[in-house]
Structures are given as C-alpha cells and as structure tokens.
Amino acid sequence: MIENAMSHSIMGRAIEKGLLSLNTVSLRAFSQNSYGSVDDYTYGGGAGMLIGCEPVWLAYQEALSRTERIFDEEAEGDRREEKRVRVIYTSPAGRVFNEAMAEELSREEALIILCGHYEGIDQRVLDRIVTDEISIGDYVLTGGELPALVIMDAVSRRIPGVLNNEDSAGSESFENGLLEYPQYTRPAEWRGEAVPEILLSGDHAAVDAWRLTEAKKRTGKSRPELLEKWYRNRGIF
C-alpha cells in the first residue's frame, strides 16, 4: 500500500531522482509462528487483537540497518544505544500533525514510521523504540498506513528539489499561519465570472497586499482560531 502510493506523481519522481529513498518492512516477515501472524489476544480481556513486541522489535532492527546507523559497540545486549533515528508511531493518542511538525521532521536524515493496526501494539516495545507519537486528526482509522502516507507526503515535499516550483512550498496554506488565498487561471472570464482585476494589473506589491487580505478573510471565515493566532503572534489584539 505504501509503495504503491509513493510510486506516483511528485513523490514517485522524487524517488526516481534520488531525492528521497523509501524502504518498507513487513511485520509479517518477522512472525514468530508458522501462520505468519503478528497479533494475539490482549491480557485482561477486551475486543480485538494486539500486535506483539518481537515482530515489531525485529522489524525495527531491520529498518535501522537500512538507515546504516552506527550502534555504540561498547553497550551490551538489546539495550545498546544507537545514534537515534526518530521513530514515529501513528496513533490517535499522539500529537496532532501540523505544518510545523512537517518542517521539523524534514530536517531529519532518516525517519522510521511504525503503522499501528488492530487494537494497537504492545506498550513495552513502543516504550523501547518510539520517539514521536503522531495523530492526523481526532478520528479512528482501520490502520496506520494512511496517516503514515500523510506524514510522508507533507515531510517529503519540503525536501529541496522535490517540488518543481520551490516558491510553492512557501506560499501554500499554513505556511505563514493563514489559509491560502484564492487563485485563478485562464480564461480571464468564465461563464460570466471575471478574475479580480488586481491580478491582471502587473502591480506585484498590490497583488501581494490583495492576497494577504484575501488569505485573512478566508482564514477568518473557515478557521478563526488560526487568524486570532496570526494576529496574536504579531502583537495585534
């Protein structure tokens, strides 16, 4: 699922160019039984199945090896310390993902994303490996693959060269704390609706001012809390 989604369009071209690299590791490859299962019933009862520690731990070690990270050879056993790779666990209990987090994560050399499934994953292995628990919203999905793809897309587009137009990453919604202003293309008039004259004027300063005004209008209408924060960050109350 991950490989298919990431093989198309902008992300696919970025991988082909070597701007991004993608490795997927299947938990089932590290199943501890002949059935290939990685889940079991939960202690204490309850509905659903829980993914066990060992398949996740072994998959994590495989993912680490693919990032070519160097372990500290002086430490002993499974608790040896490595140069930490950020490990994101997609979970509704995590911090809600936003543009600032995408920017922060884009500065990492490598990321490992652990996709939750079923009723989740045994807490012991999560405590051992996870550095960031991230949610993409206050709702429940059947698995962590879609949240992982959302995170991967938002982070990857910030890598230099991934977007053809480098300016576009800095002018879209949330980049300056506001929703994006309305945009138009040819024809200048469509079914009786004309493009705002200011956009045809060639006056770049006036166009920028119009875009800021429209961005504030749109943000105030759809996300008033963002507009309030935008003003507050600028000392305007």
Image (spheres, grey):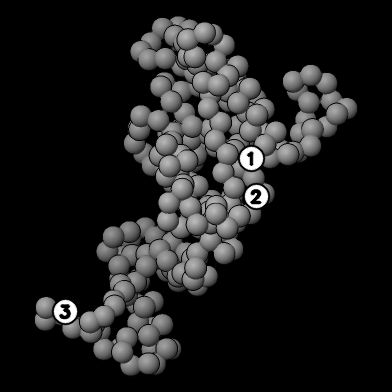
Sequence order check: which comes first, mark 2 or mark 3? 2
From this viewpoint, is residue 96 visible?
no
Q: Assess disc 3: are there few (<14), some (14-19) or many (≥20) residues with their C-alpha within 10 Å of its C-alpha.
A: few
Query: Which image quarter: residue 66?
Result: top right
Residue 76 placement (x, y as % from top left): 83, 21
Sequence order check: which comes first, mark 2 or mark 1? 1
> In the image, is 197 to the left or to the right of 3?
left
Sequence order check: which comes first, mark 1 or mark 3? 1
Type of residue at label 3?
Answer: Trp
Residue 237 placement (x, y as % from top left): 42, 69
Q: Secondary structure at mark 3?
A: strand
> In the image, is 185 to the left or to the right of 126?
left
> In the image, is 171 to the left or to the right of 21?
left
**Residue hosting label 1:** 86
Question: Badges 2 and 1: C-beta atoms under 8 Å apart?
Answer: yes
Q: Secondary structure at mark 1?
A: strand
Identify the mark at residue 190; answer none if there is no mark.
3
Point out the residue furthest to the right here.
74
* Mark 2 → mark 1, Cα distance in angstroms: 8 Å
Type of residue at label 1?
Answer: Arg
Q: Is 173 located above or below residue 147 in the figure?
A: below
Question: Badges 1 and 3: C-beta atoms under 8 Å apart?
Answer: no
Type of residue at label 2?
Answer: Glu
**Residue hosting label 2:** 108
Q: Residue at x 41, y 22 (%)?
A: 118
Query: Which image quarter: residue 124?
Result: top right
Q: Residue at x 41, y 7 (%)?
A: 45
Q: Residue at x 35, y 29 (%)?
A: 142
> In the image, is 201 to the left or to the right of 71?
left
From this viewpoint, is residue 61 visible?
yes
Q: Residue at x 59, y 47 (%)?
A: 21
Query: Which image quarter: residue 33?
Result: top right
